[in-house]
Image (cartoon, grey):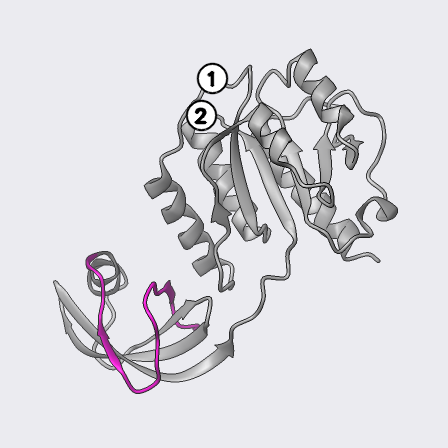
Amino acid sequence: MSNIRLYHLGRISENTTSLLSKEHTHYVANVMRLKRGSNINFFNKDGEWVSEIIFLEKDRVEVKFLNKIKDSIKKSSNIELAICLVKKNPMDMILQKATELGVAKITPIISERTEIKELNYERANRIVIESIEQSNQLTPPLISKVIRFNDFMNNLKDPTKLLFADVNSKDNLKKEDLKSEDFQTILIGPEGDFSPSERELILRYSNVVPFSLSKNILRSDTAVISAISLINFVNNSH
């Protein structure tokens, strides 16, 4: 059985000790019911280490970091997910699955037809951390501040390829659409789609690639999973 993996915010050095946070202490002692001498893997952007529990009570756990088992790696993904905000449950799913599928950045957007105007960042960050713990990654995606649609479009840099999941498009995504080392941004609209004026602004962008995900109308969370999976597949196919 593999060791449990926990994300560690602080610096990790071999042969040093650390008291676990209240949240990690509860998880280790009361949820997983680990014992003194048990091993836990801790990781962050600098790599991953095996640790050993050297002190354990229900409200206090101390570990000693042993050997490093994985070096830091530059996040291989160059994909940003730009997603119009949706209600809590589908937004939780979007954060979780986008993280599991390896995006580097998540940008929440307020468009004309977006009903939700805020994102609970504490909850959002907890979800992405839990997702990288589960998916054997080291670095969580950056979650940007909520931005209005027009500001998002105006801030796009020219080299960025905008992969627009367009319900009106009949074009499939092609290998040549992704032949670039530049950042690729997947744009997913709100429930009810973008307004005509917003669509016009999107399609005026010089590096936009509209593409179809399905003949059916997809919910936002389904569209996110489909779009990232499709782009990962095409990227890995050339």
Q: Residue at x 77, y 25 (%)?
A: 204
Magenta-highlighted residues: 1-22
Residue 26 or residue 103, whichever sits in front: 103
Give the residue at mark 1.
115
Dot label at residue 179? none
Vertical relation: 103 (above or below) 227: below
Q: Residue at x 61, y 35 (%)?
A: 155
Kindly report which numbered mark, 1 or 2, lies closer to the viewer in this rendering. Answer: 1
Q: Separation of disc 1 and disc 2 at Cα? A: 8 Å
User: Which quadrant of the structure image shows residue 32?
Assistant: bottom left
Vertical relation: 129 (above or below) 90: below
Residue 3 among those drawn in magenta: yes
Q: Position of residue 151 (x, y in %)?
A: 56, 28
Q: Residues within 10 Å of mark 2 (few under 14, many from 20)?
A: few
Q: Residues within 10 Å of mark 1 (few under 14, many from 20)?
A: some
Kindly check if marks 1 and 2 are in contact, taking CB atoms under 8 A apart as contact: yes
Q: Residue at x 58, y 28 (%)?
A: 220
Q: Position of residue 160 (x, y in %)?
A: 71, 43
Does residue 92 appear left or right of residue 178 in this picture? left
For the N terminus, the image quarter is bottom left
The kind of secondary structure the magenta stretch mainly shows is loop
Dot label at residue 87? 2
Q: Of the residues shown, which amino acid type is indicated by label 1? A: Glu
Q: Position of residue 20 (x, y in %)?
A: 22, 67
Q: Of the residues shown, which amino acid type is indicated by label 2? A: Lys
- For label 1, the SS is loop
